[in-house]
Image (cartoon, rainbow, N blue to C red):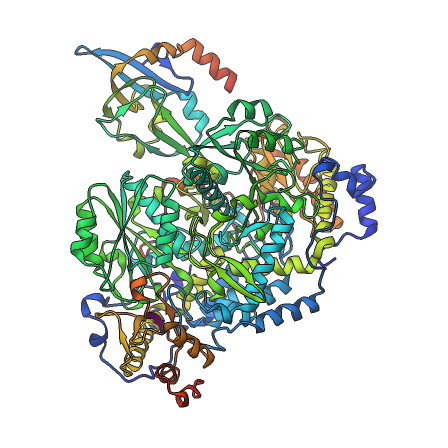
């Protein structure tokens, strides 16, 4: 996926929304900037398929040696897929954050959260300020 | 490694033969309960054990061997007389369920210690039960929860400043509260506006460290306490920094309702490589009924364990408390007396300010020219100057090469690249001078030298990422020996 | 002053460097109204000699084990401590150091922690141990909290009455502020009945906590309770006596998911209940929910094997209110003592110690019950402790008489178990000789002539 086409949370998650059989499907990951800031990742905790997520609420965690970062969902919905190979291949998050590094897919029940997200330009601006 | 030394059939300890009439084991213990072989422990000779652990000990820095200015840990000298006293058989070999009548000397000591701690804190009701500072925080928050239950009030929140030690919010959560963070001002004090905005009738307790983690006395403390009390809340004082104010100011006088001591810091109990500590708590009279039971009581000339406390939160551990640590604290307080304890804090503050005055010229101290018992400098400027990613860590590591234990680094998080120095009162001007000179020299060294430090220790910069990713948490026989 | 070393000349120079005229000026940041304007009301300073005399006087007003013969147990035991334990633990490099925040100058502590963890795994049969908690009771609490977290169940925690009453009290204290309910299953026969555990456990149960041997000294059907717990998706938490593991099957081999123990028996003096050692170990899969510090092996930048504190994101200094526990300071020195004790004992020494306890305890039970006034309150196998019922129900007077005769004869059970008002708990370690046991039995039988032959 082209990072320019994605929407971003202030907390550095990206989301891609597609139509799939009448429902909206969100693919969620974390940005290259976030992975770089977290430095060496050592662990990841993922939810299970079938679980519910809520916009603004954490659904998992990534850990470096001395920090824990919750992963926040940008939308409400049901988790339909989890990239369960990630915890054993954390390097994927750094090498290919926008494709192979996707984290969960969610069937959206409420997408009003999307309106609050940043587009690529706005997100880049935020990263420049933080970096 | 201990396990590499093991040889089948070798042993250190030999037990005497049984002197009671022989009975077959099967008659004493059913076969299905017994293991066929004892646990697969290593088999060693006595000199193996001694040599192994003695050699290990030489790989540690310690207060007995090095200056140890580890901020917020109060690594003061551990008096040898206290060790001797705590090891007297008449104090060491007492069983926790002995009858009170066979414990009068110890109970008198503990009763007196309760009184001293109450007097020093200005909070007269004392429990010696908690096992460590964090345990004391938790016990006190449970006391607060019980107090509000008793009043019939529903209070769900505990406020902690953003600069608080991590145990504060963790303890609050374990006591069933939600935590709300209060901002600090750039100068390191509680932001009163933020406090006002977050104070409501749901707030049970404000936890505050004063002197705070930046080594500063928050002058607003009485006002802060008034604000909390006006809304019916309680003020908890984290006593981690009591070494700055012994005999000079008392938490009970500046608005605290509850506090804990760290006797292993303030009252010189040795830190034991990570413990034991103790975490006695002191509270106001209105909270007294809720303290953990038992406390030591006195009836005429008899001391007793008072279990008759119907509103008590109950126990937070087994047995009375970390008595060994408390005996050392008692000895320490008796050694100094009222003038001496005050002199402890005066010299702790003098030493810290002196070191600050020497260090600030080359390692900026963002919070200013004065401090209490410790100060927090910032190594941030070395990032650009020397191209270092973690300059505080690099300084810390390089100090080890020069024979100084490192200060605390990267805490508190509110100061960038924090270097937190607590010299304590038991160091002389000459040691402080040597440390300041070394620190100065180190800040002048090349970036590469710092980034790869320490150079002289047996190991350097362990790979923590590997340790966390490919966890090896015990020795197994399959491991290649090295 | 005892440990203050700046001379007046030093102080003057320091004040000048700071730029103040007096120490008092340094304290002016504290508003005058908040300062204490009188001396503390505590006794005046004592010299080392005076302190020694004073504390020795206090100490002589106690009756330590060694002066009186100690048959007290209930979680704290008068076991033998080999001299090597004291020799190692009294090294200043160990006892005056702190938490290994700088691994380069703490490899001694870190390696000792790692070896301790390994020894605890060997002892319990579990995969992972932490580097110690406060004591057995708070370790039991932490195990319960951990089980709630692992199972994501917040309904109930099932604990039989045969678990140490102070463990149960501590659990109740902690759970009072949380959602989970403590369900106590009665044990009128001195050990659990499987059908009662079965009835108490349901799909909201996070764990069953069993003590083995239990508070009364009796053996529990640990493996069977574990099967009941596991069928319901609950964990089995076992609180064990580490000395008993010289003889008994290891809890890890019997289905325990988390093991806790009071580690005092492993080389820690009685010292009136603390500091002791909280042992805690668990299965590998739960390691991220394990509270407390953990040492892990790694390599340094030159490739040399070494040790660090690891998995620190579990802990309060990083995760704050979401940490697995608030614990920070632990019992490092007593974990070290336990490591040295186990290394000195080895498998053979531990087995012999356990066997001596077992044999002497059974001999003592038999001798005491030769007088028909006394009987064992519970049938079935026991290890080193047993409950004696006094047919005359005069437990308090009896124990007072024994005290006069130089015995700490037992722990009265009435305060915890009203139905055992006429009972007391007797513990017999490897240190008790036959003649001490005979003398106790004689004393309890009310035979003054036997009471005079106390010392073996």
- Residue furthest to the bottom in view is C449
Which of A49 and B93 lies nearest the eye of the viewer? B93
Image quarter (top left, top right, bottom left or bottom right) of the C terminus of chain B: bottom left
The location of residue C313, given as percent across then percent down, is 42, 38
Question: Residue B29 appears at what percent x and percent y?
Answer: 23, 71
Prevalent SS, magenta region:
strand
Q: Nearer the viewer, residue B144 or C278?
A: B144
Compared across the picture, whether B186 is left or right of B171 comes to right
Magenta stretch, residue numbers? C423-427
Q: Is residue C53 above or below residue A112?
A: below
Snapshot quadrant of residue B379: top right
Residue B310 appears left or right of C249: right
Q: Is residue A97 above or below residue B242?
A: above
Q: Is residue B282 above or below residue A74?
A: below
Residue B87 can be seen, yes or no: no
In reply to whether residue C425 is colored magenta, the answer given is yes
Residue C355 percent coordinates (x, y) = 30, 74
Percent of width and height locating residue C45? 72, 60
Q: For this view, does C372 lie left or right of residue C344?
A: left
Q: Indicate whether C32 appears above or below B321.
A: above
A44 magenta-colored: no
């Amino acid at each position: 996926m082209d990072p320019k086409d994605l929407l971003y949370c202030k907390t550095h998650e990206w989301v891609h929304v597609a139509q799939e059989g009448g429902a909206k499907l969100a693919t969620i990951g974390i940005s290259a900037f976030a992975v770089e800031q977290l430095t060496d990742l050592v662990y990841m905790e993922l939810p299970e398929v079938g679980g519910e997520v809520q916009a603004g609420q954490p659904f998992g965690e990534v850990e470096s040696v001395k920090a824990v970062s919750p992963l926040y969902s940008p939308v409400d919905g049901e988790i339909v897929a989890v990239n369960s190979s990630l915890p054993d291949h954390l390097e994927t998050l750094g090498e290919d954050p926008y494709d192979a590094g996707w984290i969960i897919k969610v069937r959206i029940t409420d997408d009003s959260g999307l309106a609050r997200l940043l587009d690529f330009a706005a997100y880049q601006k935020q990263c420049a300020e933080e970096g | 490694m201990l396990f590499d030394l093991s040889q089948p059939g070798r042993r250190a300890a030999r037990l005497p033969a049984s002197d009671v009439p022989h009975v077959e084991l099967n008659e004493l213990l059913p076969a299905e309960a017994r293991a066929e072989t004892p646990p697969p422990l290593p088999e060693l000779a006595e000199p193996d054990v001694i040599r192994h652990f003695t050699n290990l000990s030489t790989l540690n820095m310690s207060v007995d061997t090095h200056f140890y200015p580890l901020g917020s840990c109060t690594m003061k000298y551990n008096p040898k007389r206290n060790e001797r006293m705590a090891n007297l058989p008449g104090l060491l070999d007492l069983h926790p369920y002995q009858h009170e009548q066979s414990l009068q000397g110890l109970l008198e000591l503990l009763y007196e210690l309760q009184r001293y701690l109450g007097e020093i804190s200005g909070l007269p009701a004392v429990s010696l039960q908690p096992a460590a500072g964090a345990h004391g925080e938790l016990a006190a928050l449970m006391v607060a929860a019980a107090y509000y239950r008793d009043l019939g009030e529903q209070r769900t929140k505990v406020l902690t400043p953003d600069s608080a030690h991590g145990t504060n919010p963790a303890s609050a959560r374990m006591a069933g509260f939600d935590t709300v963070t209060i901002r600090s001002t750039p100068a390191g004090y509680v932001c009163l506006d933020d406090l006002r905005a977050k104070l409501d009738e749901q707030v049970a307790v404000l936890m505050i460290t004063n002197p705070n983690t930046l080594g500063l006395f928050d002058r607003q403390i009485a006002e802060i306490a008034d604000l909390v009390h006006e809304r019916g809340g309680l003020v908890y004082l984290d006593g981690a920094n009591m070494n700055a104010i012994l005999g000079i100011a008392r938490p009970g006088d500046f608005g605290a309702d509850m506090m804990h001591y760290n006797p292993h810091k303030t009252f010189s109990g040795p830190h034991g490589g990570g413990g034991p500590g103790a975490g006695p708590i002191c509270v106001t009279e209105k909270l007294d009924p809720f303290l953990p039971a038992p406390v030591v009581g006195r009836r005429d000339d008899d001391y007793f364990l008072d279990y008759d406390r119907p509103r008590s939160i109950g126990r937070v551990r087994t047995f009375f408390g970390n008595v060994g640590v408390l005996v050392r604290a008692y000895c320490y307080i008796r050694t100094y007396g009222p003038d001496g304890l005050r002199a402890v804090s005066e010299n702790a503050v003098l030493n810290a300010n002196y070191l600050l005055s020497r260090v600030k010229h080359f390692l900026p101290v963002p919070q200013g020219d004065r401090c209490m018992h410790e100060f927090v400098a910032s190594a941030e400027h070395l990032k650009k100057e020397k191209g270092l990613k973690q300059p505080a860590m690099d300084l810390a590591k390089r100090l080890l090469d020069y024979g100084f234990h490192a200060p605390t680094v990267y805490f508190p998080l509110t100061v960038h690249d924090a270097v937190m120095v607590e010299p304590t009162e038991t160091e002389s001007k000459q040691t402080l001078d040597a440390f300041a000179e070394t620190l100065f020299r180190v800040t002048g060294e090349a970036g590469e030298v710092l980034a790869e430090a320490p150079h002289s220790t047996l190991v350097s910069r362990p790979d923590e990422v590997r340790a966390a990713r490919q966890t090896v948490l015990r020795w197994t026989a399959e491991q290649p020996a090295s | 002053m005892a440990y203050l070393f700046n001379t007046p000349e030093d102080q003057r120079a320091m004040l000048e460097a700071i730029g103040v005229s007096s120490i008092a000026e340094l304290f002016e940041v504290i508003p005058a109204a908040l300062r204490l304007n009188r001396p503390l009301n505590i006794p005046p300073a004592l010299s080392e000699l005076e302190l020694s005399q004073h504390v020795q006087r206090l100490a002589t007003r106690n009756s330590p084990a060694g002066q009186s013969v100690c048959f007290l147990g209930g979680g704290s035991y008068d076991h033998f401590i080999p001299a090597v334990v004291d020799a190692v633990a009294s090294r200043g490099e160990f006892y005056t150091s702190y938490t290994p925040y700088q691994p380069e100058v703490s490899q001694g502590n870190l390696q000792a922690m790692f070896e301790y963890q390994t020894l605890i795994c060997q002892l319990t049969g579990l995969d992972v141990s932490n580097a110690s908690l406060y004591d057995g009771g708070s370790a039991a609490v932490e195990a319960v909290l951990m089980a709630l977290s692992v199972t994501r169940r917040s309904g109930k925690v099932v604990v039989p009455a045969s678990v140490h009453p102070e463990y149960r009290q501590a659990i109740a204290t902690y759970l009072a502020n949380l959602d989970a309910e403590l369900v106590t299953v009665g044990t009128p026969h001195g050990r659990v009945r499987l059908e009662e555990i079965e009835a108490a456990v349901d799909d909201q149960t996070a764990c069953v906590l069993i003590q083995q041997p239990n508070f009364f000294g009796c053996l529990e059907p640990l493996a069977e309770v574990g099967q009941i717990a596991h069928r319901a998706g609950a964990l089995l938490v076992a609180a064990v006596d580490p000395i008993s593991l010289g003889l008994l099957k290891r809890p890890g081999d019997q289905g325990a998911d988390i093991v806790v123990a009071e580690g005092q028996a492993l080389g820690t003096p009685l010292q009136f209940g603390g500091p002791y050692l909280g042992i805690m170990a668990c299965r590998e899969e739960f390691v991220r929910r394990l509270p407390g510090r953990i040492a892990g092996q790694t390599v340094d930048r030159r490739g040399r094997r070494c040790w660090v504190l690891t998995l620190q994101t579990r802990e309060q200094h990083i995760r704050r209110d979401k940490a697995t526990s608030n614990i920070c300071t632990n019992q490092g020195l007593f974990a070290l003592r336990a490591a040295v004790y186990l290394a000195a004992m080895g498998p053979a020494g531990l087995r012999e110690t356990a066997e001596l306890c077992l044999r002497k305890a059974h001999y003592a039970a038999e001798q005491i019950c030769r007088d028909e006034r006394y009987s064992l309150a519970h049938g079935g196998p026991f290890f080193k402790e047993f409950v004696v019922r006094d047919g005359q129900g005069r437990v308090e007077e009896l124990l007072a008489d024994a005290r006069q005769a130089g015995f700490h004869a037992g722990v009265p059970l009435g305060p915890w178990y009203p139905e055992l008002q006429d009972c007391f708990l007797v513990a017999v370690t490897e240190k008790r000789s036959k003649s001490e046991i005979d003398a106790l039995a004689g004393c309890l039988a009310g035979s003054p002539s036997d009471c005079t032959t106390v010392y073996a």
